Image (cartoon, coloured by chain):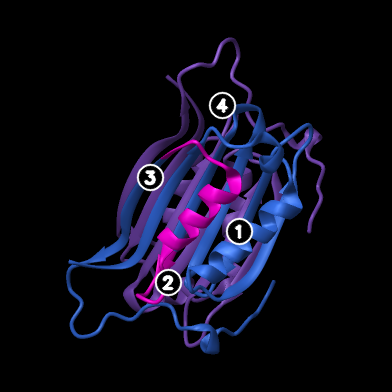
Chain colours: A purple, B blue
Amino acid sequence: MKALGNHVLVEFYECDSDVLNNCEFIEREMSQAAKMSGATIISSNFHTFEPHGVSGVVIIAESHLTIHTWPEYNYAAVDLFTCGDSVDPWTAFSHLKEMFKSGHTSTIEMKRGQLHDIKGELKHKPNAAGVAGNIT
Amino acid sequence: MKALGNHVLVEFYECDSDVLNNCEFIEREMSQAAKMSGATIISSNFHTFEPHGVSGVVIIAESHLTIHTWPEYNYAAVDLFTCGDSVDPWTAFSHLKEMFKSGHTSTIEMKRGQLHDIKGELKHKPNAAGVAGNIT
């Protein structure tokens, strides 16, 4: 059975709480993780919460990376959703683990969009050259 | 064991391909799904791909909703990530199932950020009143 997407759900425990509350740092390193994994960034959007916590997303041509942090619990939930064979989400995982100084992680890798009846080559999202880039 | 987040991973199969290629419609109905589920929208960001497909995210005070569509396979991958008890992701699921005219769905519900050592009330993301709203 073929699948359209690959989704790695990551729990980063025992992180540096100061890092998890630094929106600018998190956006930069999430973008860096996307680039290192071979992804093409379309947009990024990050928000700081009061009294603490950051939420954000990097939309890539090959799907997305998201993060939600709870500095008070030294925890971040990260999703690395990719499609195609050119992006390695585990490179992004390793980079973020180091940046967040996570002492304990848990990961689950899941196939998304499993199809029975595909014949021939499986089409994924087009690459960056095919992105219309419409932002609404 | 307590958990910080609740994550519903949805596969919408056998959808209307025209709907899955309509970026404006998808953004509107994803936002509507967020509102119907009781979430507070912080931002939304949607993109059209060529020759087909839409990717987008609605960041909510209680985490996020994301979507990636493959109209050519009548398929959409949707993630409904929420925290706190005030948001019902299944309301969003039902609305989107109807809007996409999905003939077959598959869902997995997962707990994110499972913590052993929480004492007292579990803190979730602050509500909308606590959102700093910093967009970088």
Q: Is residue B98 magenta?
A: yes
Q: Residues within 10 Å of mark 2 (few under 14, many from 20)?
A: many
Q: Which one is in front in this view, the residue at disc 3 or the one at disc 4?
A: 3
Say which label, 1 or 3, has the lower sequence index.
Answer: 1
Q: Is residue A27 magenta?
A: no
Q: Residues within 10 Å of mark 1 (few under 14, many from 20)?
A: many
Circle 1 SS class: helix
Q: Mark 3 and mark 2: span between their CA atoms?
A: 17 Å
From the viewer's perspective, is residue A106 above or below residue B63? above
Say which label, 1 or 2, has the lower sequence index.
Answer: 1
According to the picture, the residue beneath numbered tag 2 turns out to be B87
Position of the C terminus of chain A by quadrant? bottom right
Labelled pair 3, 4 in contact (Cβ < 8 Å): no
According to the picture, the residue beneath numbered tag 3 turns out to be B107
Circle 4 SS class: loop
Same chain for mark 3 and mark 4? The answer is: no
**In the rendered structure, which amino acid carries the disc numbered 2?**
Val
- Is residue A96 visible in the rendered image? The answer is no
Same chain for mark 3 and mark 2? The answer is: yes
According to the picture, the residue beneath numbered tag 4 turns out to be A85
